[in-house]
Amino acid sequence: MTQAIITQLNNQRFLLIYEENELVECHPLQGESSLQIGNIYIGRVEKVVKNIQSAFVRLDADNVGYLPLNDKPARILNRKLSKGLSSIAEGDTILVQVEQEPQKMKQARVTGNICLSGNYVALDLSGKHVGVSKKIQNEKRVEELKSLISNGVRLTDSSDMYGCVLRTACENANNDAILDEYRRICGEMDSLLHRAEFERKKGCIKEGESAHLALLSDYGIERIDEIKTDLVDVYNELRASCFADVLVSYDDKDYPLYKLLSLETEIKKLINKKVWLKSGGFLIIEPTEAMVVIDVNTGKSVGKKNKDNHILKLNLEAAEEIVKQLRLRNLSGIIMVDFINMKREEDKQQIIKCLEQGLKKDKVPGYFVEITKLDVFELTRKKVRKPLYEVIHNTMLNSL
């Protein structure tokens, strides 16, 4: 059973994901941030830095985002370009969308490839194409879905050619429901682009979904068996959404939901740099400005027989726990892991396989990169939202 729980501890709200009664994701909800992922802005290009292939865009009075120039060109709203070629210059007014939260000293990352999505369909400006979620393995259904969009309706009433991705929830969905949502989102995209063309005021012209709705949608409606919350406003919002069928209200005032979950204890574990393993070994997890460094230690774990086999067993246990902790703590970027030294090449390959299998379970893309010359295992995980420790430190560390 997969359960999502939304509750509050010390004025900080959390969305928690449990798979088979095990906590696998912990998301502090930062409220309606001015730079929420999915927000769409009419911004002004303040500076173009060609040596790093980026432009810095003034989004509103308080915030600047950076736009990689090797991404799909943003729409320039203040002037026409010959042959449709986009060449962003300082002073241009452009349409962008927030795709990554600001982290520490780094501005929010924005993109010119505007995306609107629903339960079944996601549209963007990447051109006329129809894609299907790779998680749908039924080839017959994949072809049926592609045909449904490409042949079933006209792409859009405007001259814009939208790219379309059919999400995982389409696998068992009613085709009419998919088409209805497709037409609705096409209409929303048409209206948005038309407004952007004639809007004179800069700033946010469309807000993204609330943080908990966006996280639930990213996780996948088809994967969630139950959503439980003791927050009245969240319950009312979800009751009007696609998650209404799996929604449960928790209303025991004498024993709050956060106590039932031992949430305070769980949070303390997730901000502690030491993680104990069942075998007696432990991990030390150290996020730094440049990367995340993880050290595997034998601790109390002692092998009385074959030393190499004992080390392999301990490293395999550590590898499984590492990918769980990356997901729980939302640690991203460059990740360097110093396992206990292994002599046999086949043992190292087992560790790589274990890491890769664990990373596949995470909706945030992550990959094994290489073993360095110093026998350090290098991983990477895409940066999307702030890591848990950073949000907790800023909001509630003193209260724990």
Image (cartoon, rainbow, N blue to C red):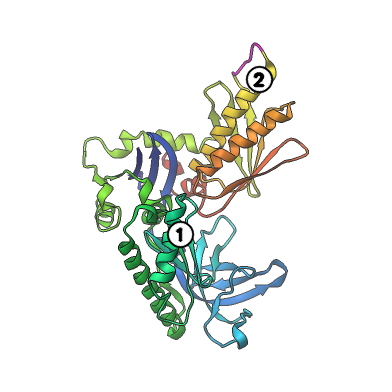
Give the residue type at disc 2.
Asn
Spatial CA distance of label 1 from label 2 is 47 Å
Stretch in magenta: 301-305
Nearer to the camera, 117 or 129: 129
Is 202 magenta? The answer is: no
Q: Please, is residue 112 above or below residue 349 in the view?
A: below
Q: Position of residue 83 (x, y in %)?
A: 61, 86
Q: Quadrant of the N terminus?
A: top left
Nearer to the camera, 19 or 62: 19
Q: Please, is residue 204 above or below residue 195 in the view?
A: above
Q: Position of residue 282 (x, y in %)?
A: 58, 27
Which residue lies at the image location 51% right of the left edge and 52% below the top edge?
386
Residue labelled with disc 2 = 309
Kindly indicate the quadrant of the structure image that contains residue 229: top left
Label 2 secondary element? helix
Which residue lies at the image location 56% right of the left edge and 72% below the top edge?
57
Residue labelled with disc 1 = 143
Kindly indicate the quadrant of the structure image that contains residue 89: bottom right
